């Protein structure tokens, strides 16, 4: 069996590219705007508040994956934790898009700043 990462005929999923990610964020933002129950500042605040709900679902999945609730036992798997973490990340990106149409640029600048502070100019390479 060959390693798929070395097979040049395999084309990457467009949804996995940075542009595909942001196209999806834009589409989800538009869909939420078209179907929102509350407009204006309150609607934006509720979208940001949605992050807390999603983080709570991560905590619930971790507790369930580790069986930390003796009354319930093991109720989740680590795949559930992964999915909930993805929901947090996506919810944050959609909320950011609600704050600015330049969300991808704002995020890219912020990521570059965090990487520079954390990894340094050499990308964290050890010599």
Image (cartoon, rainbow, N blue to C red):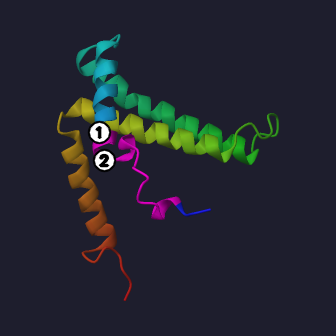
- Outermost residue to the bottom: 127
Instruction: Please state the horizontal and vertical placement of residue 63, each as a whole percent of the image.
Output: 68, 43
Task: State the residue position of label 1.
Answer: 22
Would you identify the image quadrant in which residue 122 lies? bottom left
Q: Residue at x 40, y 49 (%)?
A: 12
Magenta-highlighted residues: 4-22
Q: Is residue 98 left or right of residue 102?
A: right
Q: Is residue 19 above or below residue 30?
A: below
Nearer to us in this view, 74 or 80: 80
Task: State the residue position of label 2.
Answer: 18
Nearer to us in this view, 67 or 107: 107
Instruction: Please state the horizontal and vertical placement of residue 103, each as a whole percent of the image.
Output: 22, 40
Would you identify the image quadrant in which residue 14 lies? top left
Q: Residue at x 37, y 38 (%)?
A: 92
Q: Is residue 110 left or right of residue 94?
A: left
The quadrant of the picture occupied by the N terminus is bottom right
Q: Secondary structure at mark 1?
A: helix
């Amino acid at each position: 069996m060959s390693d798929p990462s070395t097979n040049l005929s395999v084309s990457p999923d467009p949804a996995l590219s940075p542009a595909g990610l942001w196209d999806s964020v834009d589409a989800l933002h538009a869909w939420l705007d078209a179907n929102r129950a509350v407009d204006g500042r309150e609607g934006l605040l509720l979208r940001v508040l949605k992050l807390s709900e999603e983080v709570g679902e991560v905590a619930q999945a971790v507790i369930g994956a580790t069986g930390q609730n003796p009354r319930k036992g093991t109720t989740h798997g680590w795949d559930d934790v992964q999915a909930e973490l993805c929901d947090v990340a996506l919810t944050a990106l959609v909320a950011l898009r609600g704050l600015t149409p330049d969300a991808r640029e704002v995020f890219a600048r912020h990521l570059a700043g965090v990487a520079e502070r954390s990894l340094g100019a050499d990308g964290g390479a050890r010599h």
